[in-house]
Image (cartoon, grey):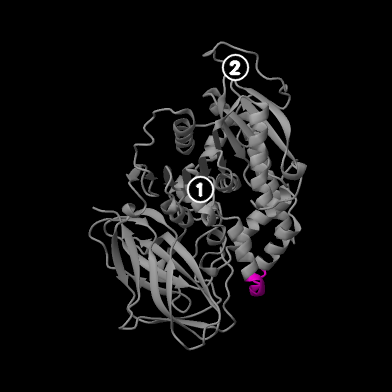
Amino acid sequence: MGSAGLSHRALRTALTGVALAALLAGPAVAGAPAATARPLPVGTAMTPQVRFTDIAGDGGTVLKANVVTPATGSGRLHPVVVLPTSWAMPQIEYLAQAKKLAASGYVVVSYNARGFWQSGGEIEVAGPRDVADASRVIDWALANTPADPERVGMAGVSYGAGISLLTASHDPRVRAVVALSGWADLIDSVYSGRTQHSQAALALGVAGLATGRPGPELREILKDFLGSNLAEEEKMLKWGALRSPAARVDRINANGTAVMLGNAWGDSLFPPNQYTDFFERLTVPKRLELRPGDHVTAEATGLLGLPNDTWTSAHRWLDHHLRGVDNGVDRERPVRLKPRTSEAYESYPDWPSAGPDRERIPLPESRRIHTNIDSGANGGLVFLSGALDQFAKLPPAVSVPLLPRAFAAVWESERYASPRRIRGAAELHTTVTSTKESGTLVAHLYDVGPLGLGKLVGNAPYTFHGKTPGKPFAVDLELFSTAYDVPAGHRLAVVVDTVDPLYIEHNPAGAQLTFSSPASDPSYLSVPLREK
């Protein structure tokens, strides 16, 4: 209870700090008048007009919003961008970017999603009411601002990204979307490998309690999810699918919505794999950008009005698809990556082209480990570890020679004479025998230097239930995608253990896992490499 209370206070303090920083990024607007700008000749430059308003969402639920309009061309229609706020963030979250968009000729409407802060209703987690709310906000913008119904866009970070994609799948008026640090598959984000991402779920739950009003359905889902209630697993999966844009990708393709996706390699809430899979299924104009960092850290400075590559790309995307600006974004390669170990961007025609070559690391000898003990190999902490990797090039690290072999299975590659440029998701294939019917394993891939220090390249969890004790079964596990350069003279290490603070583990007391490599089905880790 004490730690939960501390997390609650710390989160509220952090959110307050972000809100204050956003306010300081521009002029104070709390007392901005509700009047529209006076008519001005086309081309006259003035500060965009900001006003705060209430918008009736689905069922009449009040949504607290702010509207930023261009100060020029009173008789003209302008493209409109709707920005749903991130999870737990106040409605001023996007104010700095909204002003920049309005200065370029957009009408911008930002609003607090239902259930958060001063907006009415309860938190629905991007459910049908949230999608209906977004459409009602579009209706309001078309009726109350000089917004062009033929040039409607949506953009958002995190929760706002998911709502934007879902709305685009339901409302054909949405012609362009920018979805940053969001999700396409909610289940694959927080339940990949059939394993609860407990730190991520707890962070979202605490933030929701601190700044909003979770509804009874969300409370029940969280209780079952964190309580490992397998009897309700199917219900949870259906609940997540209803909130996953990937389940409605065909509708987005049919609507022709231009979609830009942006994410961080180390996003601890919404790992990049589910975005890359979704991107490959899109047949509309599309763009995928992946950078170092954790959840929202790639976009954060832009929210404060500072220069930011992600927001620059977002503006270019919207400018081309809503304003018709010939800025070349449609002629560029649609996949743009910034490796974790470099400052240079790379571009590719599609996601598979980033890592077309595969190198296998054999895992030949059998390994037996005891469960329920943390070996020291882990993925770090939500938000913090990815941010340290982004800003200080300090990913989670271990001394590989000192890892206790009783609790961690370890295999190492040869020392490489030339660099290995990893691009994409490494894939583990192995055979497991458990002494119990349920269990969890976590695979880690490390870049190991001459002194044995291993820097985390990627990881992923895997949980099984209903297996026959003592009977081998195959495991295929995709690690989280990355872009990482392994220097010459280093080697790669594969480490598999059973405990990681990021996840809930399901190993019964006294359980043991054996990893083997049958001659008929050898075990290996397949690593995707960029072409030399």
Q: Is residue 513 depicted above or below 100 in this figure?
A: below
Tell me where residue 328 appears, x and y as whole percent: 36, 32
Q: Which quarter of the figure has residue 438?
A: bottom right
Question: Please, which residue is most extreme toward the bottom here?
Answer: 470
Q: Is residue 293 depicted above or below 64 in this figure?
A: below
Task: For the residues labelled 1 and 2, say whether their Cβ atoms are less than 8 Å apart.
Answer: no
Of the pair 32 and 65, the residue shown nearer to us: 65
Q: Is residue 483 left or right of residue 26?
A: left
Q: Quadrant of the N terminus?
A: bottom right
Tell me where residue 528 appears, x and y as whole percent: 33, 60
Q: Label 2 sits on what residue type?
A: Gly
Q: Is residue 231 magenta?
A: yes
Q: Is residue 294 magenta?
A: no
User: Which residue was labeled with disc 2?
Assistant: 75
Of the pair 368 and 288, the residue shown nearer to us: 288
Give the Cα separation between the discs numbered 1 and 2. 32 Å
User: Which residue was labeled with disc 1?
Assistant: 252
Q: Is residue 216 left or right of residue 181?
A: right
Residue 376 visible: no
The magenta segment is 227-233
Q: Residues within 10 Å of mark 1 (few under 14, many from 20)?
A: many
Q: Is residue 443 depicted above or below 58 in this figure?
A: below
Q: Which quarter of the figure has residue 479?
A: bottom left
